[in-house]
Image: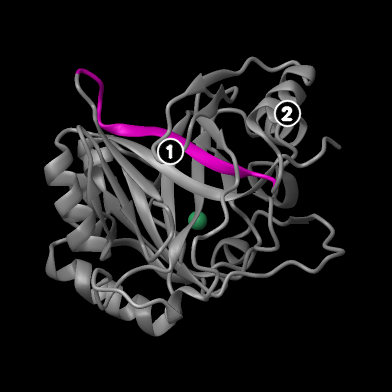
Amino acid sequence: MANKLCMNLHHASLLVADVDEAFARYEKLLGMHGEKMDGYALMRCMHEDFCLILKPAGDQKPFLDYVAYELEPGLTLAEARREIEARGERVTEIDVPLRESGLLLNDPDGNRVVLVERRRPKDPRSPVMIPTDRIPGFHPRRLGHVNYLTENVKRQYDWYTQILGFKLTDWIGEAGLWLHIDPRHHVLAFLEKGYNHIHHLAFELVDFGQMRAGLDHIARYGRHVTWGPVRHGMAQNLASYWRMWEEEHFIEFYCDMQVLDADHEPFVHPDDPYASNTWGILPPRTYFMFTPEAIQMERDQVYAYLMP
Ligand SMILES: [Fe+2]
């Protein structure tokens, strides 16, 4: 197994149609805050550097730009680059806000991955102890993981474990893969669904009560839950998924994810409904689709009447 190069998820970068509109939307729906910079915006949940970058999409489709991870403490970009190139992968450099630079790679599905050097928080106290005049009453704790759909989950498994040293947590059957780089159950997951697409950005909440507050909150703004609340059997987290259709992904609100034992052994869960949701309800098939028709079917609740 390759040495682990990354210690945690740092941020996601999104290409958006209009930075001002997207900034206001993430502020309003998720309780995030941040700064508008020259031509882009940075957003955060609490006191972290930032966990979202909003960039103008220009001629491109509004979509996920890349996902960035922090390198292991003390590991420099130059050292990481040498290690990754020795593993046979091509690396280029990319400008990253508040950092001198980052390393850019493409995974086999074409998802862009960025690596930045670890920077310790300026204030070592727990985030709940740090005074603020910016953080609203409802806000997530942190950006916790990302999940993609893929046409080849085995290929993704090989790449993330062999090039970046991600660790296997669990499988569901042969088509669902969960990977970790810290004691939490997963920071990254893939579901083989026949095509490559970001599925969700997952924001950790404190508890199930805050999920209730969050779902009440988004419902007032006309965003409705596509799947949830559920209790994932594999990973244990309580989760609810709703669409951020502007950039073609879901937002997951989650809490109570499994913390791994130091001697965790990867497990292959049976591909049955209860590994996905111990409470028993599976998502509508539109949950894996991003077309306007699929979104409209959800808004019309078509699957509750008659699934065509
Ligand atoms: Fe998730």
Looking at the image, is 151 positioned above or below residue 176?
A: above
Instruction: Judge by depth and name the residue closer to the eye, 276 or 164.
Output: 164
264 horizontally vs 154: left or right:
right
Number of other residues with Cα within 10 Å of mark 2, as a class: few under 14, some 14 to 19, many 20 or more: few
Tell me how many marks there are: 2
Q: Position of residue 67 (x, y in %)?
A: 48, 38
Q: Amino acid at mark 1?
A: Ile
Q: Position of residue 234 (x, y in %)?
A: 65, 63
Residue range in magenta is 59-72
Is residue 117 within the magenta segment? Answer: no
Q: Position of residue 112 (x, y in %)?
A: 49, 27
Q: Quadrant of residue 46?
A: bottom left
Instruction: Judge by depth and name the residue closer to the eye, 226 or 242.
Output: 242
Residue at 35%, 78% in the rendered image: 131
Cα distance, mark 1 to mark 2? 29 Å
Q: Which residue is mark 2?
A: 79
Q: Which residue is mark 1?
A: 198
